[in-house]
Amino acid sequence: MTKKKWLTMGVSVLALSALLLSACGTKDGGGSASEGGKSAASASVLDEIKSRGKLVVGVKYDTKLFGLKDPASGKVEGFDVDIAKALAKQIVGDENKVELKEVTSKTRIPMLDNKEIDMIIATMTINDERKKQVDFSDVYFKAGQSLLVKKGSPIKSIADVKKGTKVLAVKGSTSVDNIKQKSPDATVLEFDNYQDAFSALKAGQGDTLTTDNAILYGMAAQDSNYEVVGDPFTDEPYGIAIKKGEASLLTAVNDGLKSLQTSGDYNKIYEKWIGKVPSK
Ligand code: GLU
């Protein structure tokens, strides 16, 4: 079952290639920045990036496979981090010209608003509510919400999450709203980040942890006593978020994503982080 889900994700990469190649920047990604939206006097974010000579990207530090900080080396690594480096190469000509800053699900939009970061590449689902606050690139990864449990748990799927079930989730994520909608009688406990939520699950503070399957597989890979159960019960298409109205940056990001597809670099990054994760 778990294996099959990874295969499904693999297949979706092929679908994604077609999607990125055919996207015109305003369809699935929802990028709706209007050309000419900026006044001539204020420099665009793309101009600022180019004159500064580096990209400042908000990534997760708590999410294995996507953005995880190794406390020993201080290095932050993952799929999103590699996408950030690849875009730095496209936009400023050098994959090392990228400064990573930690975001959580809750802090990422405020940090973008405050201009602390140029963009968010942090397991962020594109949805209509968020589109009111930010512009999104085309979809660069497809996930779906699922459940992580201790092996042997009576919870086998979303149908088993009901009154009395304690569900752990992270503040500011779509996962919280989705689980409240799917299982309105369950008790949802919210944490600041994914490592805290996972520690709480291990400490027995909840029956299941819910978020995107791809993130949960990263946790299961950290501790083999835990497994992902049931089929995904939502669609979580990831997009890169930028400030609204930055048409030139949106075009640069989408062009960058498209050329990662055509060069095969996207598939290499996918294989490196996602393709080789053991399914059990
Ligand atoms: N993709 C979901 C979201 O954007 C869950 C992962 C996260 O918290 O970043 O909210």
Image: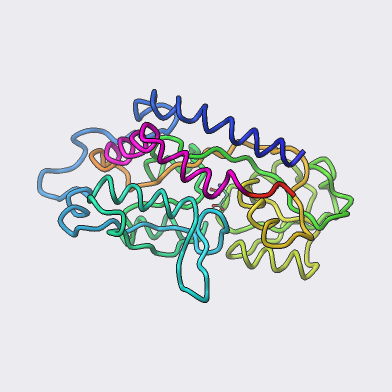
Residue 38: % across, % down:
19, 42
User: In the rendered view, does 243 fall on the left or right side of 103?
Assistant: left
Residue 103: % across, % down:
46, 61
User: Which residue is located at x 27 percent, y 45 percent?
Assistant: 90
Q: Quadrant of residue 250?
A: top left
Q: Main secondary structure of the magenta part?
A: helix
Q: Is residue 275 above or below residue 10?
A: below
User: In the rendered view, does 84 fall on the left or right side of 220?
Assistant: left
- Magenta stretch containing residue 264, yes or no? yes
Q: Is residue 20 above or below residue 129?
A: above
Residue found at the far bottom of this picture: 72
Q: Nearer the viewer, residue 154 or 65?
A: 65
- Magenta stretch containing residue 84, yes or no? no
Task: Specify the segment rendered in magenta.
Answer: 250-276
Q: Nearer the viewer, residue 259 or 35?
A: 259
User: Which residue is located at x 22 percent, y 48 percent?
Assistant: 46
Residue 134: % across, % down:
38, 45
The mark total stands at: 0
Q: Is residue 136 above or below residue 220?
A: above
